Image (cartoon, rainbow, N blue to C red):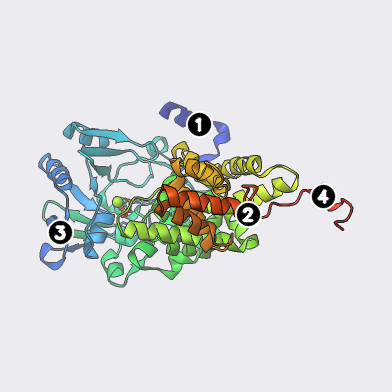
Amino acid sequence: MLKGFTRFLQSPGAHLKTLFGPHEAAGGVTAPRIIPRDQHTVSRQHFSEAALKVLYRLHNAGFGAYLVGGCIRDSLLGKMPKDFDVATDATPEQVRELFRNSRIIGRRFRIVHVRFGREVIEVTTFRGTHNDDHADHVAQQSEQGLLLRDNVWGSIQEDAIRRDFSVNAIYYSIADFTLHDFANGMQDIESRTLRLIGDPGIRYREDPVRMLRAVRFAVKLGFDIAPESEAPIFDMAPLLLQIPPARLFDEALKLFMAGHGVETFHMLRHYGLFAMLFPEADEVMAELPWAEALIEHALASTDKRIQEERPVTPAFIFAALLWGPVQRRQTDLCATGMPPVPALQLAAQQALSRQLQHISIPKRFSLPMRDIWDLQLRLPQRRGKRAAQSREHPRFRAAYDFLLLREAAGEIDPGLGDWWTAYQESDGHEQQRLVDKASSEAPTGRSSRRRPRKRRRRSSPGTS
Ligand code: ATP
Ligand code: MG
């Protein structure tokens, strides 16, 4: 795999150049501001046992060992950190040797995962600047400035300025419990500012995902994005189209499954980032007034569930994000004379395959999404045993919740949702009565939604 990648980098058509000239890192490898233990609030009590074990074993083996990133940032903000990122001057191989329960992962960024039961501590070797010949082999950048690989080891100072935001570049040393602040992160924590380190244009070009991270952290932490970090996003949003769909899937989960989905959605739209992730969903919102409301309702209900510590699935959110495109395609297909069921199936397939060019949704989510969509055509059909059969479907509950969202968003008239609510709350006898009532109201057993007319009917006599 790695060999193939290296060959790609060396091939004449690859349009790559070596990463950075000698002055790129300029701006400054600065000396850190060191904050002694008695002048900060970060305590070992905030850290998991596993994180401390990793730090101490590295330290005792003579390596530098620091916690950095989200765990320190969150801890300074008085939040209990959830995951721990360790930075060290030990190489991945040296880390690997110290921990039997570890493995080296990644190609773009080689890091070590040390596993303790369900907890994984991520150990990263300090990244350096790439200004010698050796760097050619370990770091590469595309002509557009996109960072393709970054495995040059360096000092802690160099590592710090390669991080994304100032508040993510504060290091906690296990040697003396001091904080090392390389980019005025403490000040930005104080003023609740998210500030990209270095030249924003260069940093977004190196890794356009940083634009998504800016939105995610701004929402999660309630920070403002510094004006100079914010300004380039509007123009640079299309750079996200260069990012592999698998990586964007991971990012999309972090954006929408962290309990602040609604706010994140609005901010992504504000910067033009949403259109780069979900182009068709973005387009459809201009045409179908309910499509935006449906997404908002889906995200709001997910946010609420997360707050209540109830389980959530990305399938539900993705189903809502793409329902507008599916509906638009289905309507078009029905207008050509295709019956609703095959039209929905084809529409679903088309909308999904277009989306997969941007964000790769694994089958374990796309299959349930399709079930949720298919069930939307089955839920209106309640005659005979049909209601009971739908009720037994493993995806019934999600499909029913989805139906309620569609009603709340104004896509369809309310009524069916209440019927299903009553059906679920009833016993056998009452259920039969509900089925009989529904059957008498919709004698064909078909959806009470008006089906799009077939074109040829329009020209038949008496209809003009
Ligand atoms: P959280 O884990 O709460 O989402 P985090 O800041 O820890 O936030 P991670 O994705 O775990 O985010 O990354 C750990 C650290 O690695 C970051 O704090 C940052 O210093 C650095 N980092 C991660 N991604 C990037 C990136 N794309 N560019 C530069 N630095 C990055
Ligand atoms: Mg983290």
Residue bearing mark 4:
457
Distance Cα–Cα, label 1 vs label 2: 56 Å
Judged by depth in the image, the label closer to the viewer, 2 or 4, is 2
The C terminus - image quarter: bottom right
Q: Earlier in the sequence, mark 1 or mark 2?
A: 1
Please state the total of marks drawn on the protein image.
Answer: 4
Q: Which SS class for mark 3?
A: loop
Which quadrant of the view contains residue 15? top right
Residue bearing mark 3:
178
Q: Earlier in the sequence, mark 3 or mark 4?
A: 3
> Measuring 60% from the left and 48% from the top, which residue is drawn there?
326
Mark 2, other Cα within 10 Å: few <14 / some 14–19 / many ≥20:
some
Observer-nearest residue: 436 or 223?
Answer: 436
Q: Earlier in the sequence, mark 2 or mark 4?
A: 2
Residue bearing mark 2:
448
Mark 3, other Cα within 10 Å: few <14 / some 14–19 / many ≥20:
some
